[in-house]
Image (tube, helix red, strand yellow):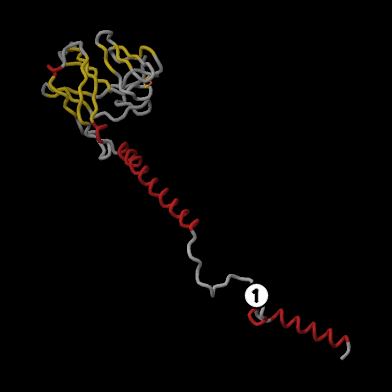
Amino acid sequence: MTGRERLGRHGQAAAESRELPTGHTGQTPMGPDTSQPPAAPTRRNFFLWLTAGLSAVAAVVVGIPFIGYLVGARKRRTDLWVTLGSVSEFPREETRLKTFSNPLRQPWDGMAANTGVYVRNLGKDEKQKDQFLVFAVNCAHLGCPVTWFPQSGLFMCPCHGGVYYADGSHASGPPPRGLFKCVWQVVDGKLQIRPPHYPTLQDPLSPDDTAEG
Ligand code: FES
């Protein structure tokens, strides 16, 4: 056999081996070996899935109250009134703290649903109608509950030193406005208010309650 014939046979064999499936050549397959059983989950995978699962649970636990708050804010009731007491319970030109359970409460509010407002009886107007100022307890700065000091005639905030006059207007400190005012009415000699939500500069308790002082 000549060298040329040997070369021709080797070249043909090489071409045939390229055309044959790899299983027919006896070589190691290059793709994934599906004949092997799936690998058992490793400890690393287990902890990855555990972390992902716990993160999902935490997101749900944290997110549900937030979504509930947003939905509750959109669906805010406008037909509810809270009766604070008869007009005679509020002496004229005095400020009284009145506490009550807020009907806007959410199941997860707990003790936080027990809130209050400051009521100041201004007496009667020229039409002999009772006039009141009813303030949210929340400071207009960051929402801390303010305290009324009758000796000085001032509301004071313990958090950053915000001070308000008896009419709720801003006296000093960081608050950008006066105390938030509640919507009120007198029905059959009883003082009623709209249940207050947590007031903010963008969402006061009354559309007429503009920033002041
Ligand atoms: S929260 Fe009242 S002064 Fe800051």
Q: Is residue 208 visible?
A: no
Which residue is the site of mark 1? 28
Q: In which quarter of the image is the C terminus?
A: top left
Toward the front, the furthest residue is 43
Q: Is residue 92 visible?
A: yes
Regarding ligand 1, which quadrant of the image does it lie in?
top left
Q: Picture quarter containing residue 178?
A: top left
Ligand 1 neighbours mark 1 (CB distance < 8 Å)? no
What's under tag 1, amino acid-wise? Thr
Toward the top, the furthest residue is 152
Task: Give the total of numbered labels.
Answer: 1
Please, is residue 105 above or below residue 128 in the view? below
User: Would you call the spot at circle 1 few (<14 residues within 10 Å), some (14-19), or many (20 or more)?
Assistant: few
Of residue 147 and residue 139, the one placed in the foreground of this image is 147
Q: Picture quarter containing residue 11?
A: bottom right
Q: Which residue is drawn at 37% across and 42% down?
A: 62
Q: Quadrant of the N terminus?
A: bottom right
Q: Where is residue 198 in the image (x, y as percent from the top left)?
A: 31, 29
Q: Which residue is drawn at 57% across and 72% down?
A: 33
Q: Picture quarter containing residue 158?
A: top left
Q: Which residue is drawn at 37% across and 16% down?
A: 161
Q: Where is residue 17 in the image (x, y as percent from the top left)?
A: 71, 81
- Find numbered disc 1 in the image and state the secondary structure of the residue it sits on: loop
Q: Position of residue 103 (x, y in %)?
A: 21, 34
Q: Which residue is drawn at 19% across and 14% down?
A: 121
